[in-house]
Amino acid sequence: AQDLAKEMEKKFWNELQERLDDIKQNPLPYKYQQPELWWKSLRRATPEDFIQSPSTAISEDDFKKIFDTLMKWPDDFKPLKKVEKIIQDKIKLFNEEGKVDWATAELMAYGSLLLEGKNVRMSGQDVRRGTFSHRHAILRDEVADKSHSRLKNLPGGTGKFRIYNSFLSEYAVVGFEYGYAMATPNTLVLWEAQFGDFANGAQIIIDQFISSGEQKWNRMNGLVMLLPHGYEGQGPEHSSARMERMLQMCAELNMVVTNITTAANFFHVLRRQLTWPFRKPLIEFSPKANLRHPGSYSPAKDFMTGGFKEVIDDAFVKDPAAVKKVLFCSGKVYFDLADYQQKQDVQDTAIVRLEQIYPLPVEQLEQLYNKYNKATWFWVQEEPLNMGAASFLQMNLKSINYGVISRQPSASPATGFAKVHAQEQKDIIETAFGI
């Protein structure tokens, strides 16, 4: 009986080996599925890809087509009065000044992708309206309560625009959107936190997948995370998206971190996500109060030329040779610095904006360092010294000598007292120009 059992086992293993050998010699035909074909058309990124961004401009005809579509609705539709006024103000801004605000630039980026046949998907808490009442991607009829998607009737737009108000479980929603972006590399997939502070609810997904997935599993992903960030006196739970955490995880070109100040640059960075022949997660520290700051508005021509600007030089200073000090910064604090500079007509201090913090545009910064070669440089941030981009820059930006101006190191991201916040903010600006 034992011999029979051994013989049966040997026969079984021989049959398995014969079938394995046959499959190896005559492999079964395999037909790639559509997502696999999309990924096969892409390649891995190289350091050279980040020296300068590709052109992401659109034509004047497309600009007009998208803008006009966004600013009208069906004849039998009656939007809320307050929302109607907001849209009329956007039309007035364009007609009188030729400029576009942040929210319109964002929707125009989505519309431009729809014209290219690409889909856009967005989720997050209250994203249809926007937490700060700025986006208004979906309008509501104040009489019938029916909805109208402002990009639905875009002429020639073959792509689909999908936007969902998701529930307050960042871990679940970000995990789902990461998977969606994995399955559809030619779709712009975005998740917006209600406040950037709440992204810590998705920290497991950020740590295990977004920041390290390409290095661990050779799987690229183009998910966009919009994290509202900025010190405006709203307290420790509504000020910081924890930029320092994101930057600490940056290495090997694993993801892109931006803190953008202009509507056109935001437009271009969104389009760049699908223009690149590879995919990278994008972490954008988006504005809150400055969504409506006139300094963030962009002229129409900026949408029809060029691409994303990693660094923006100072256009206010008349004579670079007379500059004795350079304040380089990122995001909201720029507007506070620029307001002081322009009101006081400070011509010996230039303000340089670092719009992309990782991958760090070292060559562009070095060019400006040579341009302002007589100046003393300072990195200015409104975050405490142990937060924000300060420690990341001190570790990675070695070719430029600079000091750091910030809030004092703190265990909490921000104070809970409005008066203390205002004094701290004032001290940063006065130190920057007085030092």
Image (cartoon, rainbow, N blue to C red):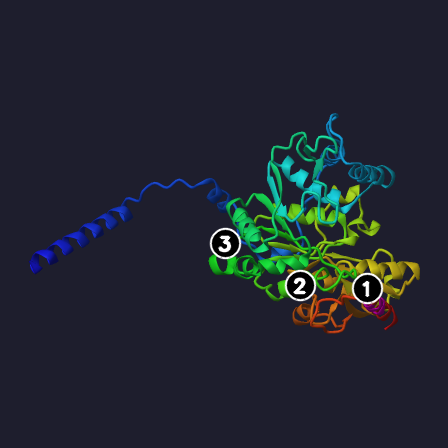
Q: Position of residue 345 (x, y in %)?
A: 93, 60
Q: Are marks 1 and 3 in contact (CB under 8 Å)?
A: no
Q: Which residues are magenta?
A: 420-427
* 90 drawn magenta: no
Q: Is residue 42 left or right of residue 270?
A: left
Mark with earlier residue (1, 2): 2
Q: How many marks?
A: 3
Determine whether 128 is above or below 241 in the image: above
Dot 2 alpha-carbon crowd within 10 angstroms: few under 14, some 14 to 19, many 20 or more? many
Residue in the picture at 67% in, 57% down: 196
Residue in the picture at 24% in, 47% down: 22
Q: Are marks 1 and 2 in contact (CB under 8 Å)?
A: no
Q: Label 2: which residue?
A: 242
Determine whether 403 is above or below 208 in the image: below
Quadrant in which the N terminus is drawn: bottom left
**Res. 254 in view:** no
- In space, the residues marked 2 and 3 are separated at their CA atoms by 25 Å
Q: Is residue 306 left or right of residue 225?
A: right
Helix, strand or loop at disc 1?
Answer: helix
Dot 3 alpha-carbon crowd within 10 angstroms: few under 14, some 14 to 19, many 20 or more? some
Q: Position of residue 74 (x, y in %)?
A: 73, 27
What amino acid is at disc 2?
Arg
- In space, the residues marked 1 and 3 are separated at their CA atoms by 45 Å
Determine whether 316 is above or below 398 in the image: above
What amino acid is at disc 3?
Arg
Q: Within the image, what quadrant is residue 145 found in?
A: top right
Indicate which disc residue 418 carries: 1
Q: Label 3: which residue?
A: 219
* 425 drawn magenta: yes
Quadrant in which the C terminus is drawn: bottom right
Mark with earlier residue (1, 3): 3
What amino acid is at disc 1?
Ala
